[in-house]
Amino acid sequence: MRTIHRGDRGEAVRDIQHRLLDFGLRIEPEELEGRFGPSTEEAVKAFQQRRGLPSDGMVGADTWGELVEAGYRLGDRVLYLRSLTFQGDDVRGLQKRLNALGFDAGREDGIFGPRTAAAVAEFQHNVGSASDGIVGPDTIGSIERLRPAVEGPSRAVVREAEYIRHIEEKQTLVGSCVAIDPGHGPDDPGHVGPGGLSESEATMLIAEDLAAELGARGAHPSILRTRDDAPSPSARALAANELGAAVCISIHLNGGEPTAEGATCFYYGTEATYSPAGQRLAEVIQEELVALMGLMDGRTNRLTVAMLRETRMPAVQVEPCFLTNPTEEAMLTDPVSRRLLAAAMAAGIERFFGSVESATGPRSASGSTDAGRSSAGG
């Protein structure tokens, strides 16, 4: 879809404004005829912050999708497993209730996938209903009568935290499939550095170096796009899922003022839930980037973009530097520096599997290093 931003007018803007109002945000009356003015931009930013999106004040595909999904409440529509999956806050509410009742609906990501469908069928069997996996008024009524305790920590988060220990004890990088997503593509260059290097070109160069480094360490890397194609984020997430990848690394580059610098790693998360495995993967990669490359620490943060939300394995979005910073752009054009960058990322991935120690010092029993851990933002 075309990105809608400040200065735009029309029915699309009016639709966005009404969805923001329904979400409880305020827009000045003089803008409500469909003018994307300052108060609409601020409302979009507030919405993006609450939903774990980059708060740029513009409505692109991810923000529009979240605006649509935020409008659904459990009971608004019949839910069931289909090829074009149901997505929305109604699905997220269902997942939270099923998890609270002890039925494993998986991560509370608002996507009605096979795991959620299996949890619905198991619940229906336990209450003596037809186990058809269809969530209509009867199934919702049965759930609500049991008064699920939806406040407090999600059981899905607790289960995923246990999964991290399983990875560190049972799995190694050697023989594991690692999906690598070079952000953007030929028709979507992304940020462009002062020297002319585009984000789409730079992410492919980093991806190729990372694949070589991981291969040398015994992993089976797979790059999710070529130089000539640009699949959608959802298509890339599906490809990673079909590969059965152990982890997924999405590579992007930041942009801003010429003096802006530093590395940041993102993992799936909203105000209400997050991926502990994604957080751990983001933390160890961030630590290696800072320690081995001397990059400014932009820390780790939650994000809900498709590559992090729709992948079924621990996934992170790595933004190792600002392409708009001349010094950091020069680092990306230098093959030696770029290989060191890839080596730092690979070291973090290897640490995630528990097979090596940190470059910043021995790990404690909790998994942190003597130099400290980056704390996750919200």
Image (cartoon, rainbow, N blue to C red):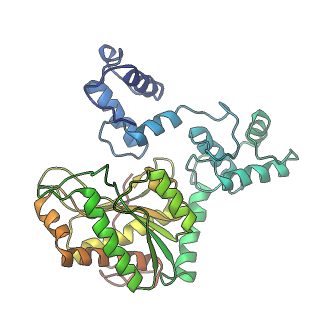
Outermost residue to the right: 128
Instruction: Judge left or right: residue 235 versus residue 159.
Output: left
Count all numbered tags in the image, as a single digit.
Answer: 0
Image coords of residue 247 (percent x, y):
48, 69
In the rendered image, which quarter is residue 122 located in?
Answer: bottom right
Image coords of residue 55 (percent x, y):
32, 42
> Which one is in front, 234 or 73?
234
Q: Which residue corresponds to the image point at 72% horizontal and 53% vertical from the top-left?
A: 119
Q: Which residue corresponds to the image point at 12% horizontal and 53% vertical from the top-left?
A: 258
Specify the quadrant that holds the N terminus. Answer: top left
Image coords of residue 302 (percent x, y):
40, 54
> Which one is in front, 125 or 191?
191
- Kindly tell me whether residue 63 is visible in this rendering: yes
Instruction: Judge left or right: residue 276 versus residue 99.
Output: left
Q: Which residue corresponds to the image point at 38% horizontal and 45% vertical from the top-left?
A: 53
Q: Is residue 16 above or below residue 307?
A: above
Image coords of residue 240 (percent x, y):
51, 63
- Kindly tell me whether residue 345 is visible in this rendering: no
Outermost residue to the front: 228
In the rendered image, which quarter is residue 28 located in?
Answer: top left
Q: Is residue 140 above or below residue 189?
A: above
